[in-house]
Amino acid sequence: MIQINENYQKLQPTYLFVEIGRRVAQFQRNNPDRDVIKLGIGDVTRPLPPTIVSAFSDAVREMGDARSFRGYGPEQGYGFLRDAIAQHDFATRGAEVSADDIFVSDGAKCDSGNFQELFATDITVAVPDPVYPVYVDTNVMAGRTGEAHDGRYRGLTYLPATRENGFVPSPPDTQVDLVYLCFPNNPTGATATREQLAAWVAYARENKALILFDAAYVEFIRDDAIPRSIYEIDGADRVAVEFRSFSKTAGFTGTRCAYTVVPSACTAYTTDGTEVSVRDLWNRRHSTKFNGVSYPVQRAAAAVYTEAGRREITELADYYLGNAAIIRAKMTELGYACTGGDNSPYIWVETGRPSWQFFDLLLEKTGIVTTPGAGFGTCGEGYIRISAFNDREKVEVAMEKIGAAFA
Ligand code: PLP
């Protein structure tokens, strides 16, 4: 008899987006002539920038020519892309990252979900609340938690991100082994200061812990005082892994390319306390289970680092940040406290009532779809997330409608 991994039985249904879809469908059935504007999703709407498309299509043509055809590439990614990443994403920020420590992949979702499998099942794990659900569910699947009760899994340490701590949790008083951090944050839009990240690095060093730092939204940071990489903090290379993605940065959600940095100094331990290189473990895992990102996609990603590519992706992020500014200004004007939307594409709005109630109210009054904060964790109750990933005209119309309905 083939038996299942019982841990999968503990997983809570992916209720959030299914339930949003159900309520929107119901609204549309009841109001067939009213427009719906979706500001709930985390997917981009703008096309790939021209320099990237051109590199992409040139590489496709290379693949169609016997003289330049390529088969399997290196599992870790082509040197041309890893070198460009090391130079432009890190060296220019004063963070030393070797190209050898960069692992190109097809998504930060898979990498941030898969990384935990390098570690023992009985390690302790801390996640922010609210949280990007992948960090939680993959640890549930791996058997690191008990059952869920009232929206929280037993055995996980939740780090509340609240108005009081500016949505940036401090290290806990207790000892944890693996910590997930994400800045700029999904869903709260909060960013962490150098001092806040330094406190986490110090905590990890003291506790021989590891930080999994998700920087998928780094391209939206405009304030130069905010660190873009955890490796801007001294000593982070010993205790932190960083996930990056071209998805939101360059419109690659459907093209798929990301990378993970695992510095060679980063260590974990055997049961007898012997140091082991996390980089070597990940390299082994990556080359066993992954066969590399397609050559044209890596060429397209490398074009991000050309002068024209940089300019175009900055314009792309500026476009969404322009939307975010419009959203934030309107919600603030209406008296709602907002976080994010300045160095992040998400605006986290304190609604003064239960998340789903506010979601329904907005939908009924204006036809605008947001994401109820409660769907991201207990501490998200009372908030909604508004996403800036949409067309400018739609955002403007949406905010006019909200202004008229809530003034
Ligand atoms: N990390 C965070 C925090 C995200 O919000 C997302 C996507 O929404 C991802 C990772 C996924 O990135 P990718 O498209 O590279 O898999």
Image: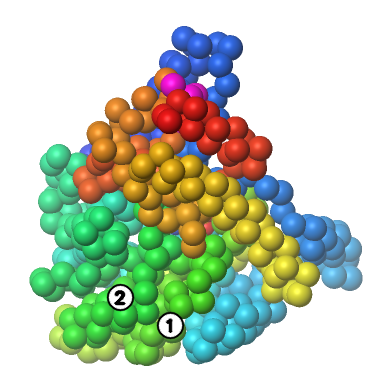
Magenta stretch bounds: 365-369
Residue topped by disc 2: 196
Residue located at (48% from left, 31% from top): 402
Q: x and y percent of residue 59 in the render?
A: 80, 64
Please name whichever residue, 102 or 269, is drawn nearer the observer in this view of the structure. 102
Q: Earlier in the sequence, mark 1 or mark 2?
A: 2
Magenta stretch encompasses residue 141: no
The kind of secondary structure element at disc 2 is helix
Residue topped by disc 1: 231
Q: x and y percent of residue 19 in the render?
A: 37, 28
Does residue 254 sit above or below 298 in this rendering? Answer: above
Q: What's the amino acid at mark 2?
A: Gln
Does residue 311 sit above or below 323 in this rendering? Answer: below
Q: x and y percent of residue 345 in the render?
A: 51, 53
Does residue 189 sit above or below 117 in this rendering? Answer: above
Q: CA distance from mark 1 to mark 2?
A: 13 Å
Q: x and y percent of residue 281 in the render?
A: 38, 77
Asked if the beta carbon under badge 2 is closer than 8 A to the nearest atom of ligand 1, the reply is no
Dots 1, 2 in contact, CB < 8 A: no
Residue located at (20% from left, 72% from top): 171
Determine which quarter of the picture holds residue 92.
bottom right
